[in-house]
Amino acid sequence: MRRIDEKILITRVMILDDRTAFARLVEYHQPAIRRFFLHQTMGDEMLTDDLAQETFIKLYYSIRQYKGLSGLATYLYRIAFNIYQDHLRQKKATDAIDDYPHPSYTPVNDVSMDINQALSTLSTHERACITLHYIDDLKVEEIAQILSMPQGTIKSHLSRGRNKMTQYLKNNGYE
């Protein structure tokens, strides 16, 4: 989707409450948001779907506050990360923390399973930084906006995350 098309769709949603325009925005951004949540939830597809749906509902109700200072994707990732943080807080409050892949998640092969296990060794912020940077190909500046952290902190999370994943993979037979 071209930037101009996205701006037109956003404007139509803001001013006209155009649900067709909103559906097009969702259709365009949904794969990236689902991928983000799949990595954060360690492959729990049901939880990913719930969190993604909640993200787009929140976007719909908050789109009039979007100022366009950053791209819609950055704004959307920020909403998604906040929703994921809220989910973790709720989970912690009920003492139901489960950091392992959901049984319905079937990795494509042993390598992807090992990478998912390596991701599970990271803190929430490290995992978010690693997946946003290396999988979603976002720049450090964009990640800093999404996570509301200084760029230096993002770089530290990336470095620590890479080191932890490298160590995990080396310990499990990868060179």
Image: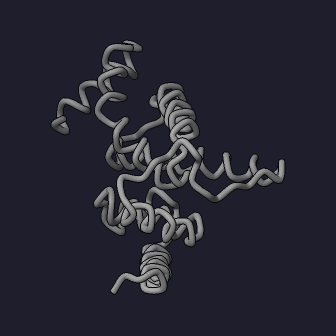
Q: 69 and 116: which one is in front?
A: 116
* Residue 51 occupies quadrant: top right
Relative vertical location of residue 150 with respect to residue 100 in this rendering, above or below: below
Relative vertical location of residue 69 with respect to residue 47 in this rendering, above or below: below
For residue 133, say whether it is visible: yes
Q: Which quarter of the rendering shows the N terminus? A: top left
For residue 156, say whether it is visible: no
* Residue 98 occupies quadrant: bottom right
Q: 168 and 35: which one is in front?
A: 168
Q: Residue at x 73, y 52 (%)?
A: 89
x and y, in percent, of residue 158 in the image? 43, 76
Q: Residue at x 73, y 55 (%)?
A: 97
In the image: residue 68, left or right of residue 95: left
In the image: residue 168, left or right of residue 69: right
In the image: residue 91, left or right of residue 149: right
Relative vertical location of residue 36 with respect to residue 45 in this rendering, above or below: below
Q: How is the image coloured?
A: one colour
